Amino acid sequence: MSKISDEAGRKLIIERFTSPRHHHKTWDETQKGKVEPLHSTTCADRLEVFYEVDSTNHFKNLAFGGSACAIATASADLLVEKLNGLTLSEAKTILKAYQKLITTGQFDETEENLLGDLIVFKNVHHQKNRQSCATLLSSFLLAKIDS
């Protein structure tokens, strides 16, 4: 049982979709990071992710842009908030727990504490067509960490 009710979760998803905190329309060309496009294979979600990994292997200046559905936008916003400033190892642990949550709906208390607000996506596993929306950014970041 999650500490966040389904109703509170829906409200948070809508809030982060309509007013994302880490969405940028343009990128500062003076920043050192990379901008990469992300395209869903199952719907019209199109995001860009800006990221930088500093010399100590921490995510820095993580942000996203583009246009996507409520699930993709809210998950990207919450993931960026959660991962910014973490080491790649710490981020990978969170991303793996998140991917497990999205595909199975399963989590234990430790994972719930680790995921924080990302737990609002606990019911996405029931909707196979939404799993790719919820994992658009997380799948990309996991692949980058592993490469």
Image (cartoon, rainbow, N blue to C red):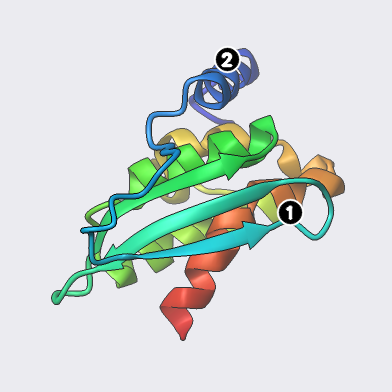
Q: Residue at x 48, y 66 (%)?
A: 141
Q: CA distance from mark 1 to mark 2?
A: 21 Å
Label 1 neighbourhood size at 10 Å, few (<14), some (14-19), many (20+)? many
Query: Hey, what amino acid is under mark 2?
Result: Lys
Locate the N terminus by quadrant.
top right
Query: Hey, what amino acid is under mark 1?
Result: Ser
Q: Whole-percent x and y of residue 7?
A: 63, 13
| In the image: residue 141, left or right of residue 55 | right
Q: Is residue 27 above or below residue 53?
A: above
Q: Residue at x 66, y 39 (%)?
A: 68
Of label 1 and label 2, which has the lower sequence position?
Answer: 2
Give residue 132's mark. 1
Secondary structure under the numbered disc 2 in the rendered image: helix
Q: Is residue 68 above or below residue 101?
A: above
Front residue of this view, candidates 92 and 141:
141
The residue most toward the front is 29
Q: Whole-percent x and y of residue 43?
A: 82, 48
Q: Residue at x 39, y 46 (%)?
A: 80
Residue 137: name its quadrant.
bottom right
Q: Whole-percent x and y of residue 4?
A: 51, 23
Residue 58: name its quadrant.
bottom left
Front residue of this view, candidates 42 and 32:
32
Q: Is residue 10 above or below residue 123?
A: above
The residue most toward the bottom is 147
Q: Is residue 73 above or below residue 29?
A: above
> Which residue, given by chain and number where applicable, does mark 2 sit on?
11
Label 2 neighbourhood size at 10 Å, few (<14), some (14-19), many (20+)? few
The residue most toward the left is 56
Residue 22: name its quadrant.
top left
